[in-house]
Image (tube, rainbow, N blue to C red):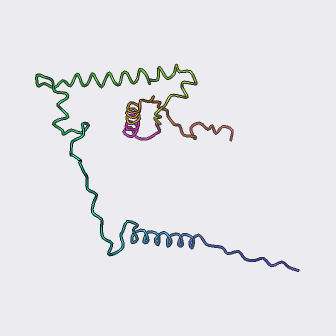
Amino acid sequence: MRLKRHKSLLISPKSLILCCAIFTLFGLLVLAFISGDDLPAGTPIPPPPELHNMTAKPASTCATVEEMGNEAVGPSGGVDSWKQSLKVRRLIRNHFESHGASRVRLLPPDKFCKQGFVMGKASEAGFGNEMYKILTAAALSIMLNRSLIIGQTRHIGTSIRLESI
């Protein structure tokens, strides 16, 4: 007695891709024409809530372009940009004294693990992209008060030796 095998339904790759494309287009059409934010027809639009006892005062952190330069202008009317430059230099120097590589290398393992880090990863991209990544990581490390560690990734192919093959 021969056993009859049932032929399983095989789907060709072309028909699978066609079905995926049809369902994708249908989904995009549904998303384009049906919006969850639309109100049904005839629904009155509620007025915006009124603000009571709210006075419009500019925030102390906001300033116009003209007001921003007033901090650097000295009493004689001259610009004391060197004072501002020294302030920034002092900030950067203090940051790297507390979070620089020379200090991080000397940390014991338990303190090293508790330290927060901003990781900078360099790979083989263009010089501009690398400088952008490194400077962004440095700015983040200063703003977040974290240590900056820059590592370089290497491709796997350079570390594999083909002598054994």
Looking at this rendering, what residue extends furthest in the left direction? Answer: 76
Quadrant in which the N terminus is drawn: bottom right
Point out residue 38 in the picture as x, y percentages from the top left corner.
Answer: 36, 69
As drawn, 26 above or below 48: below
Q: In the displayed structure, would residue 105 be above or below residue 135? A: above
Q: Residue at x 30, y 25 (%)?
A: 88
Question: Is 132 placed above or below 25 here?
Answer: above
- Nearest the viewer among 62 and 25 is 62
| Magenta segment, prevailing SS (helix, strand or loop) | helix
Whether residue 130 is in magenta: the answer is yes
Q: Is residue 110 left or right of residue 45?
A: right
Split into 4 quadrants, where in the image is the C terminus?
top right
User: Quadrant location of residue 79?
Assistant: top left
User: Residue furthest toward the front?
Assistant: 53
> Picture coordinates of residue 111 (x, y %)?
54, 24
Q: Write down the region rendered in magenta.
A: 122-134
Look at 54% across and 72% down and name the residue there: 19
In the drawing, does residue 99 fall left or right of residue 12?
left
Q: How many marks?
A: 0
